[in-house]
Amino acid sequence: MDLVVFWIAAGVAGAAAVNLIFQSKPINSVLSLVVVLFALAVIYLQLSAEFVAALQIIIYAGAIMVLFLFVVMLLNLQKDQFLSERRPTLRSFGVLLGGTLIIEISLIARTFAARGVHAGAPVVSDDFGGVRQVGHLLFDKYLLPFELTSILLLIAVAGALVLAGRRPGAGIKGKSE
Amino acid sequence: MIPLANYLLLSTVLFGLGVIGVIISRNIITILMSVELMLNAANLALISFARWHGDPGAHVFVFIVFVVAAAEAAVGLSLVIAIFRRKNTVNVDDLNILKR
């Protein structure tokens, strides 16, 4: 039963990821990425990472993807603006390189996972990966990195405002270039 | 129980698809989304190793990766908006002023 759920979620994630990179319309790519995120949240639940699965849906699919969707709709891109030239050599070259990379890493990962240490997952408590356990880690052992992430977010907000904010008087000059 | 190799295989495939997307796509927004896909592949590997070692410390790292992804998306997308305002395009082939 577990395996069936895993393969369904993995198949959905893989198919949506393929759809993401080969779509010509960016809006479809954004929605495919949302599908990938939800399928991954299912897999996180299987790995008893409930907190991370909830965060994945709330933060990733809920906030970050809305940002992408918003920008795609704000720019109102037409299909022709992306595929002005399809560049078939680059396409096949990229697929070849990426395919080689996938085969290489999966061979390494297979030998790595086949080692005795990783033969079976240990039995963990019901609380494993729950809000209580991860929260204790966040506010105790990893307090400094947690606080640093808030500074990182502050810097990102300031940077986004500086980059995308329209300065008074600069709008018309920027358009002319 | 599902073997660890399955999770690592899925993570590898998602990462490779992200690499392919970065190489072949000509649209900045799709490239940014492929980067997000690669971050998610890394998250999946972290979570599965956390389960196999019985150590939830990796969940904290995944949380930090979420924050980094959010910061990356915010800054990257505002760069896209700034570029679109000036050059009216999001095609990476048209953004070659550093080459000239």
Image (tube, grey):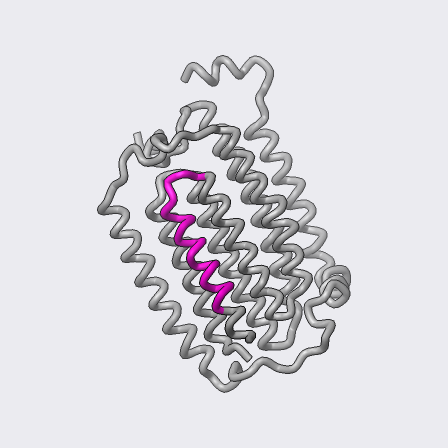
- State whether residue B58 appears in this view: yes
Task: Tell which of A21 and A101 is nearer to you.
Answer: A21
Give coordinates of residue B71: x percent, y percent.
59, 44
Total number of numbered discs in the rendering: 0
The segment highlighted magenta reads: A7-26
Please tell me whether residue B3 is drawn above or below residue A102 in the rendered image.
Answer: below
- Quadrant in which residue B100 is drawn: top left
Position of A147 compared to A39: left or right?
Answer: right
Q: Is residue A18 on the magenta stretch? A: yes
Is the N terminus of chain A in the top left, top right, bottom left or bottom right quadrant? bottom right
Please tell me whether residue A108 is drawn above or below residue A117 in the rendered image.
Answer: above
Please tell me whether residue A166 is drawn above or below residue B90 in the rendered image.
Answer: above
Residue in the image at 37% along x and 33% along y: A79
Residue in the image at 43% along x and 43% along y: B30
- State whether residue B79 appears in this view: no
Task: Tell which of B54 and A70 is nearer to you.
Answer: A70
Looking at this rendering, what residue extends furthest in the left direction?
A: A89
Q: Is residue A62 on the magenta stretch? A: no
Position of B4 compared to B57: left or right?
Answer: left
Looking at this rendering, what residue extends furthest in the bottom direction?
A: A116
Please tell me whether residue A27 is drawn above or below residue A53 in the rendered image.
Answer: above
